[in-house]
Image (cartoon, helix red, strand yellow):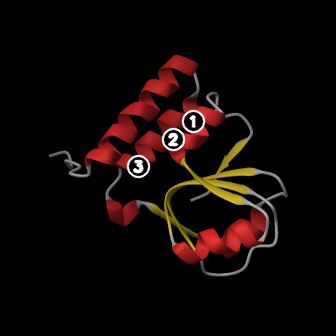
Amino acid sequence: MKNKKTNQELVTLILDLKKKSREQDSPIWRDVAMRLEAPLSRRAEVNLSKIERIAIPNQTILVPGKLLGAGEITKKVTIATYATSKSAVEKVKKAGGRVITLRELMDENPKGTNVVIVG
């Protein structure tokens, strides 16, 4: 039996991601939708320390789950995520970067080009 999501906001986001994928012929949004459909226990949780290790300055990173504030970040990056901790947002802003929602990334970059998925 398939897991039924009860968070209506998440269900709507998943449907919108799939729709954007079809409209823009962009597989990245379908991939993210499938990851968000997974059970909560399998959803990505990424620490800033991991992003610091792999990111290039001014890169756009997508976390299909939650961004956590463990570690430090010194690079100016844009991080799009479904959920984030308060400390992670503060640290990213301090480094000159920004944290946005998946929906904001879809609006800013409909094709999903030059976006790196971490998690």
Q: Mark 2–mark 3 contact, CB under 8 Å?
A: no
What residue sits 41% from the left and 32% below the top? Answer: 16
Sort mark 2 into few (<14), some (14-19) or many (20+) by Cα contacts within 10 Å. Answer: some
Q: Amino acid at mark 2?
A: Arg
Say if 15 sits above or below 74 in the image.
above
Give the distance between the C-alpha atoms of the residues marked 2 and 1, in whole angstroms. Answer: 5 Å
Residue extending furthest toward the left: 1
x then y, percent, for residue 97: 75, 61
Badge 3 crowding class, 10 Å Cα cut-off, few under 14, some 14 to 19, many 20 or more, is many
Direction from residue 70 to residue 39 in the image, left or right: left
Local SS, label 2: helix
Disc 1 crowd rating (10 Å Cα; few below 14, some 14-19, many 20+) is: some
Gap in angstroms between the C-alphas marked 2 and 3: 13 Å
Q: Which residue is mark 3?
A: 36
* Mark 2–mark 1 CB contact (< 8 Å): yes
As drawn, 84 above or below 31: below
Q: Which residue is mark 2?
A: 103
**At which x and y percent is residue 73?**
75, 73
Element under disc 1: helix
Residue 30: x percent and y percent?
Answer: 48, 34
**Which amino acid type is shown beneath numbered disc 3?**
Leu
